[in-house]
């Protein structure tokens, strides 16, 4: 005798499809008197797992702090370009009264800020922090920076970097505070509970042939077939997409 309940790969049911699936099975079995059908144990285990569906939520990936960070990145980039342009002017003019200061400042700027505009955000942040650390430990260099007129830029950059660091820390803490349980673990737990209930129904059907399981089974099958159709349709679309990509690649190669 084959399976009386349509087999369905629960792992391939999408996250936001799982709540309706679990709730549907609970409703169908619940109204069929699971105690009288001798499947109450596995049904109760599914009921215990059911609240986990509330954690299968839509993930909102944008955080308000992200917009602030984007704005700060733009401001920082503009400021860094301003510093670079100022330094280019100093190097070109080579004012005699600043000769000694320029010999200190120009290599310093080139080392830390020379190509910083092309760096990613994390690398740029580290370079800026190392630059200020070096500057704070060298009084001659600090005085030279002031004399050539870069201190105003550096004070602004320091304030901007502090705001940047604060915003990143704030966003990281907020994201951590709303972290959801792992989706795969939740789906696995619910899938096991559903499978155990299905097995219990099929065993009870064999053990108690005088009882009428078919109204419940037919309704479960109708529900499962809807999900199975969606799974097969997605699989077909994915295969057709892969074939189309392969043909495109082959045509391009030819």
Image (spheres, helix red, strand yellow):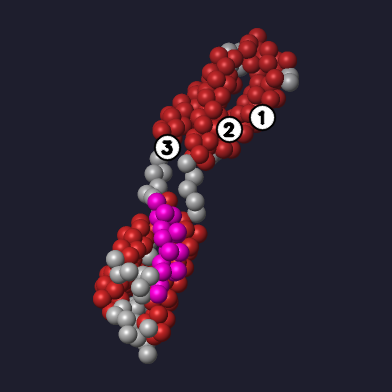
Note whether 136 is above or below 246 in the view shown.
Answer: above
Q: Residue at x 37, y 90 (%)?
A: 1
Residue 45 located left or right of residue 107: left
Expressed as whole percent of the image width and height from the top left, the position of residue 250 reads: 37, 73
Numbered range of the magenta stretch: 38-54
Q: Residues within 10 Å of mark 3 (few under 14, many from 20)?
A: few
Mark 2 and mark 1 in contact? Answer it, CB < 8 Å.
Answer: no
State how far apart marks 3 and 1 are (Cα): 29 Å
Q: Residue at x 50, y 27 (%)?
A: 76
Q: Position of residue 12 (x, y in %)?
A: 40, 67
Q: Secondary structure at mark 1?
A: helix
| Dot 1 crowding, Cα within 10 Å, few <14, some 14–19, many 20+ | few
Q: Percent position (x, y) of residue 26?
A: 34, 63
Q: Quadrant of residue 143?
A: top right
Q: Which mark is residue 130?
A: 1
Magenta region, mostly helix, strand or loop? helix
- Residue picked out by circle 2: 125
Residue situated in front as seen by the camera: 167 or 91: 167
- Residue at the image position 33 percent from the left and 60 percent from the top: 23
| Furthest residue in direction top, as rendered | 97
Above or below, 51 against 178 in this view is: below
Tell me the tag on residue 155: none
Q: Between tags 3 and 1, which lies in front?
A: 3
Mark earlier in primary sequence (3, 2): 3
As measured in the structure, the alpha-carbon distance from the residue carrying label 3 to the one carrying label 2 is 21 Å
Q: Residues within 10 Å of mark 2 (few under 14, many from 20)?
A: some
Is residue 122 in sight in this rendering?
yes
- Image quarter of residue 149: top right
State the residue position of label 3: 63
Residue 153 among those drawn in magenta: no
């Amino acid at each position: 005798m084959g399976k009386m309940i349509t087999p369905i790969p629960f792992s391939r049911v999408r996250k936001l499809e799982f709540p309706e699936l679990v709730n549907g099975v609970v409703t169908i079995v619940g109204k069929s008197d699971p105690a009288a059908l001798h499947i109450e144990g596995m049904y109760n285990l599914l009921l215990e797992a059911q609240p986990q569906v509330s954690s299968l939520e839509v993930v909102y990936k944008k955080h308000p702090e992200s917009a602030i960070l984007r704005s700060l990145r733009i401001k920082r980039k503009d400021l860094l370009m301003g510093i670079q342009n100022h330094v280019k002017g100093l190097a070109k003019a080579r004012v005699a009264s600043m000769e000694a200061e320029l010999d200190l400042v120009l290599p310093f700027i080139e080392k830390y800020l020379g190509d910083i505009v092309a760096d990613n955000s994390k690398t740029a942040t580290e370079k800026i922090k190392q630059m200020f650390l070096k500057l704070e430990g060298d009084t001659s260099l600090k005085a030279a920076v002031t004399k050539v007129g870069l201190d105003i830029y550096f004070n602004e950059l320091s304030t901007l970097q502090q705001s940047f660091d604060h915003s990143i820390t704030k966003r990281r803490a907020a994201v951590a505070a709303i972290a959801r349980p792992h989706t795969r673990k939740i789906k696995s737990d619910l899938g096991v509970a559903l499978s155990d209930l299905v097995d219990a129904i099929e065993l009870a059907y064999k053990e108690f042939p005088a009882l009428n399981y078919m109204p419940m089974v037919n309704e479960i099958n109708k529900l499962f077939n809807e999900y199975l159709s969606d799974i097969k349709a997605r699989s077909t679309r994915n295969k057709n997409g892969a074939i189309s990509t392969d043909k495109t690649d082959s045509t391009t190669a030819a």
